[in-house]
Amino acid sequence: MVSLNDVKKAHEEINDIIHKTPILTSSLLNVRCDREVYLKAEHLQKTGSFKIRGAANAVKQAMAEGACFITAASSGNHGQAVAYIANQLGIPAVIVVPEDANRAKVSAIKAYGAEVEYCGLTSADRIPRAKQRAKENNGVYIPPYDHPAVIAGQGTVALEILQQVMEVDVIVVPVGGGGLMAGVLCAVKNMKPTVRVVGVEPESANDTFLSLRQGEITAISETSTIADGLRTLQPGNLTFPILKEHLDDSVLVTEAEIIETLQFLMERTKQLVEPSGAAALAAVMSGKVGGKNDKVAVILSGGNIDLHQISNMLES
Ligand SMILES: *Cc1c(COP(=O)(O)O)cnc(C)c1O
């Protein structure tokens, strides 16, 4: 479905667009976790999250196939990533966002040069509208995770981790719709299958955890986790079979564990990470992943958080 070669090709396609983000370490963190921890700093990525990897690969592919218009349906990191890359590549884009979308996020999308259209409140309203706008304009709709080019693009982060962290034992990845995880698995399980890969979700957004336990895609009815990038209600049709086949373990973190981890990252390592971006590290810091002598690589997946949100969290 998505081969190691697809991930390698994606890396060649997007290499000059993305940052090769650094690996951060902290001796205090190693002491706290009682193991060596390596943080893959995707919060320092262009547009503030790894989403640019998949978006850049998918938009380039669509353009190579003749598209002259791009749409997406997200006010979050995917919407920002698609807006940015469309602008860079000189192709017009419309990002369909919910009527109650966060203003800061909408202005970021506009600043990247995309048109913003408000539509409804749920993805069931937004996605058909984004697809329709694409169809009307000889364009292509870019989904946030359930697309082979998006999965291959997200997998490029794993190629970098395998190169940057010698003899890594475990890679810990946050899971929303599963695009990032599916990409990581397609790369790691074909290149270094002995490396264990662990997925992390908030307790209240445990759709992938439940789906893996049931052996089939299982939806949850709602979630209000602060980790807004992980609020998907079910894993994707393309992503889930990859997770089901290859994922070594799936663990859950509480809201309090996510907030404590954000505070630690800010105070001790001076890194500003959003709640979804801190979930994987929260699992390691609360002792839910790996053994004592493991070298653990953790994806800090994004850093888009506004000061208002931070002050609310620090008061809670
Ligand atoms: C989208 C996103 C995720 C989850 O990625 P999926 O591919 O949907 O599983 C995790 N963290 C951040 C910051 C995100 O933007």
Image (cartoon, grey):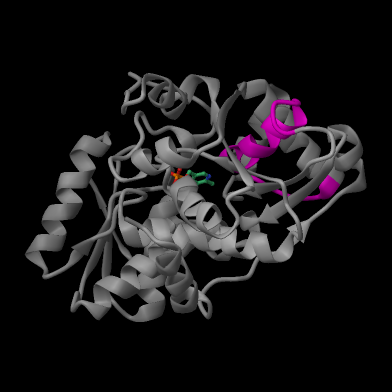
From the top left corner, tell me how far across and down residue 75 is, in percent.
38, 48
Q: Residue at x 28, y 67 (%)?
A: 93
Q: Residue at x 42, y 26 (%)?
A: 212
Q: Residue at x 60, y 56 (%)?
A: 192
From the top left corner, tell me how far across and down residue 265 is, in percent.
77, 42
Q: Nearer the viewer, residue 159 or 94?
A: 159
Quarter of the picture containing the N terminus is bottom left
Q: Is residue 41 left or right of residue 38?
A: left
Task: Please say if 290 is above or below 130.
Answer: above
Q: Nearer the viewer, residue 81 or 63?
A: 63
Range of residues picked out in magenta: 269-290
Residue 37 lies in the magenta-colored region: no
Task: Please say if 127 is above or below 217.
Answer: below
Most extreme residue toward the front is 194
Q: How many marks?
A: 0
Q: Is residue 213 left or right of residue 143?
A: right
Residue 279 lies in the magenta-colored region: yes
